[in-house]
Image (cartoon, helix red, strand yellow):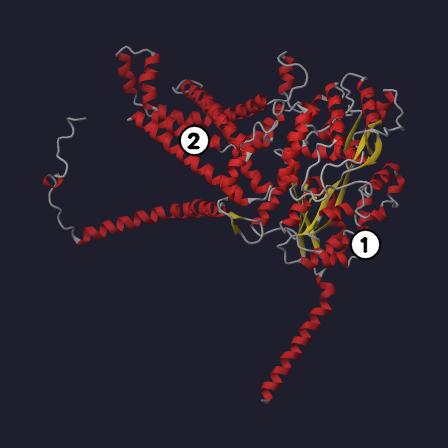
Amino acid sequence: MSTMTTSTPGTPSTRTPPARPESRPARRGRRLRALVGAAYAAPTAVMVCLFFLVPLALVAWMSLHRWPLLGKAKFNAPANYSGIAEDELLRSAAWFTVEYTVVVTVLLFVVAFGLALLVQHRRPGVGFFRTAFFLPMAVGFASASLLFLGLLSDEIGPVTDLLSWLGLVDGYVSWTSGSPDSALASAVVLVLWRFAGFTMLILLTGLHAIPPDVYEAARVDGANRWQTFRRITLPLMRPTIALVLTLMTTGSLLAFDQFWILTRGGPDNSTTSLVMVIYREAFIRLDLGSAAGISVVLLAVLVVFTVLQFRVLRRRSS
Amino acid sequence: MRTRGFRAVSAVAAGVLVLAACGGQEPEAADDGAVLTLWTRAATESVSKAYADAYNATHRNKVEVTAYPNEEYPAKLASAAGAKSLPDLFAADVVFAPQYASQGLWADVTDRLAALPVKDRLAPSHLGAGTWEGANYALPHTIDLSVLLYNKDLYAKAGLDPEQPPRTLREFADHARAVDRLGGDVNGTYFGGNCGGCVEFTLWPSVWAANGDVLDPEGEEARVDSPEMADVFALYRSLYEEGVAAPASKDEAGPTWLGALQSGNVGIAPAPSVWLDALEQQGLELGVAPISGLAGGESTFVGGDALGIGATTEKVEQAWDFLSWTTSDEAQVEVVAKNKGVPTRTDLADNKYSAADPRTVLINGLVAKGRTPYARNFNVSFNDPQSPWLQTVRGALFGDAGRALADGNTAITKSLQQG
């Protein structure tokens, strides 16, 4: 580091040549290019503004009011925020959501990375497996949740029958609401089935971006498979892993469909996620202000979490 | 001056003519060929459609019914209200009516209802549910009562008299035990132990029959820790622990409740009266009995849907034309009673269709003995899967019963009073 910093601070002007006045056509060309660039970006900017920034501002504004479905809103800050601390259901939901996020992120990453390593190289039949692993992504998440609800049902699903035929279970079993652990496990299996292929695909692009000659050099140096994986694959995959982890954690913190459909948040509120509480505030209690308040806090947590995650992973990779 | 005077007279005359024309058209304005949208939940879709078909056949207005899945319906309504685009008419589970009325989602129909000749003959508990701060917002649309349904074949096999249903809740438990002894796939009884709505619908009548209460009349104080409620829970708990109630009762959240009874393997169970027809279509021969208290008495939960005019509609006249028509003899007898439904008019409990089946007479007669609980925060406190009531139920039936009822009462009261 110290050999690089030979210049003295405060004397850059002695090194750079004096700026020459820009000619008028050059300036006009630059302005035109900037305008064209802005025009290209405009549709996206408008969409982001209309469907992200405006609703975001509205939610923040709503969170400061008692906001009835019909009629005039009444300013009541900070009631919607102070109520959050007293909400027991919200506390247990926050804890469960964090727990679920950790479980799903770890398992999904391990499974997806394993699958990506399995189908990394071009071999006969590998295309079939890549497609097969990715295929669940083609099913909508709500539909997939309903599919699992049916499959796991003791009344109509084949899973319990199959397991009792194999002698693994005996009698009546309720996977989705029998116990907190089995309910969570049902949702985790569903998420793994639905998202492992997609995560695998992102990791696969990262794996393919590593130049083959790096592996070649490692082999020449006598590195075994584990050393190659630890010293080459993992460090060079860091940006991809950062992306995947961010997508998985934010997705898990916003979990809704799987619990809403599969477990209804039960048994005994053990699988109630944060977004389910927001939904309950807005559509069951009809308290839009309180729902907006929780949403704003959740958003703030997500932003902090994502920034920290990126910082940690970037620092390590640099 | 003369011209100005002439103009003024002409303007007044024109105004009078317009007013006269409007006044003359008033009776027609209510049935002027308007298309009215009506939203309802899937559970009561068939009744709403039957009403609409009969009305459309004899009126110029046309009512179009759209049904939404039961669980998603409140969210759909809330979204529509937020967007100020409620349908012209919408039905709601009668226990949610006070909340919708308090939020102003229905138009105020107090004066119109007062002028309705059959006002005093409409199901009083439903009318009460559609009332907020003295104003009326909704009328009874469909009625669904909780009753005991028992399988006559299983009764005969178990050595019970199929014509002698239980007269007390203790007898109900004894009958269930007797049927359960048949063994195999047969279970004595079945209940929705993971469904707040199912439990209140089927267990509360036993509390009411014993002169107990679950809620104060204003819907602000819970009384689920009463001895009457504790006794009822204890009885169902023992049936589950003895294995008399099907094991799936613990996890029954509602969706497979009807399916479990349709299997024909359940001896006797409290259930919605509207299922009688659906169950008999599966070839089951069923008896009907009122839900009783531990030592006798009888009561029922008067459920079903209330119907009101969407607060954001501009077709109030036309919507009222349909709404008031649903209370007519024609609608109640030829649409509701003909399709084996319970009339929303107490004076029509005995009608030419009900007379054919004594079970229907029994069901219709229960309306006057039953109750519809009233609370502004009913859904969030009792029916929602995350409600404190469901936690109380789970504790009382499968956990630490004493603590569940005491803690539950505090939690439910807090939820009921939340602004």
A77 versus B31 height, above or below: above
Kindly identify which residue carries mark 1.
B118
Q: In the picture provided, is A56 more to the left or to the right than B73?
A: left
Q: Is residue B69 visible?
A: no
Report the quarter where the C terminus of chain B lies: top right
Determine if marks 2 and 1 fall on one subunit: no
Q: Chain of mark 2?
A: A
Q: In the picture provided, is A312 more to the left or to the right than B71?
A: left
Check disc 1 and give the amino acid type: Val
Q: Position of residue A313 (x, y in %)?
A: 34, 27
Check disc 2 and give the amino acid type: Leu
Q: Position of residue B101 (x, y in %)?
A: 66, 49
Nearer to us in this view, B251 or B56: B251
Q: Position of residue A81 (x, y in %)?
A: 49, 41
Q: In the picture provided, is B289 more to the left or to the right than A201?
A: right
Q: Which mark is residue A247?
A: 2
Which secondary structure, mark 1?
loop
Dividing the picture into quadrants, the one containing residue B181 is: top right
Q: Residue at x 38, y 26 (%)?
A: A241
Q: CA distance from mark 2 to mark 1?
A: 61 Å
Nearer to us in this view, B47 or B389: B389
